[in-house]
Amino acid sequence: MPELNVDIPAFKTWVRKEFLHNHESGKGEFERCLVFAVRSVPNRAIGFRVLLESGAQYEGIPIHALCWSQDAPEASLYVQEMWDCFGLNVVCNVYAVLEGTTASIYLQDNTWAKGRYMFSLDWHSDPTSDLPDERGDAHIFSMENGLYCAYANNRICWRDGTFTIPFADKEEKPTYRANSVVYSCEIDVPSELKKPLSVRKADQDQESSQ
């Protein structure tokens, strides 16, 4: 059964008030909120569920409506989120190795920005997510400029002081490419190993007797 809605690590932040008034009023104003879940509708931006101090709950709040600082600049959804949702089936993970780390994110306006990792969204069981070179997860970051962003692996340079040597700090960048190969240990079997074990053993015995 499709998940559609998934819990995320809850966090308190600000939501731009015009997103609570159908963009008819509230411009330049903010309201405190608790973000606690995500709603995934195919071909739409990630929709955050928020609980307001007034007791009202909103769903479908886009990431560029949220900011942890009221001094954060306004930004376009195109810059703050890389992909729309791939499907209804979404899961949330907080990867232990990435928890608490920072990263440099190459935004879609061709600038680098730094942020701190919060959690990751990943999709499955839809036509795009099942293709190895087309799928992409969305790592959520709290950015230095007061905004949040959602970006996939190919736009992120992780900064772990105990292990990584960030390529974002160097002039020469790596030339990695998305892998289009589908691996399966039950398909990629050498022809010799497809023989029954008894036949393989008989072949080995014959070879050893020669």
Image (spheres, grey):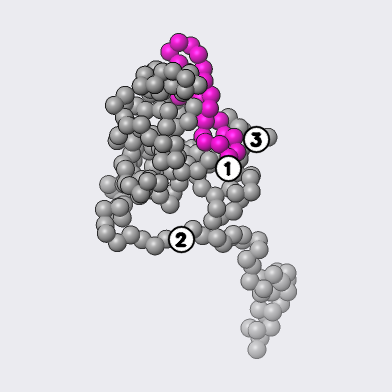
For image coordinates 54% across by 50% down, the residue present is 135
Q: Is the C-beta separation of discs 3 and 1 under 8 Å? A: no
> Taking 56 as reference, is 62 above or below it?
below
Q: Is residue 198 magenta?
A: no
User: Which of disc 3 and disc 2 is earlier in sequence?
Assistant: 3
Per the rendered image, the range of residues in magenta is 35-60
Q: Is the C-beta separation of discs 2 and 3 under 8 Å? A: no
Q: Type of residue at label 2? A: Arg
For image coordinates 56% across by 62% down, the residue present is 181
**Residue 8, image x, y percentages:** 49, 30
- Residue 99 in view of the camera: no
**Residue 145, image x, y percentages:** 30, 34
Name the mark nearer the viewer: 3 or 1: 1
Q: Residues within 10 Å of mark 1 (few under 14, many from 20)?
A: many
Q: Is residue 39 magenta?
A: yes
Q: Secondary structure at mark 2?
A: loop
Q: Type of residue at label 1? A: Phe
* Residue named by callout 2: 177
* Residue named by callout 1: 86
For image coordinates 40% across by 49% down, the residue present is 155
Q: CA distance from mark 2 to mark 1?
A: 21 Å
Q: Secondary structure at mark 3?
A: loop
**Residue 19, image x, y percentages:** 46, 23
42 sits left or right of 14 in the view:
right
User: Which of disc 1 and disc 2 is earlier in sequence?
Assistant: 1
Q: Is the C-beta separation of discs 2 and 1 under 8 Å? A: no
* Residue named by callout 3: 2
Q: Secondary structure at mark 1?
A: loop
**Residue 47, image x, y percentages:** 52, 30
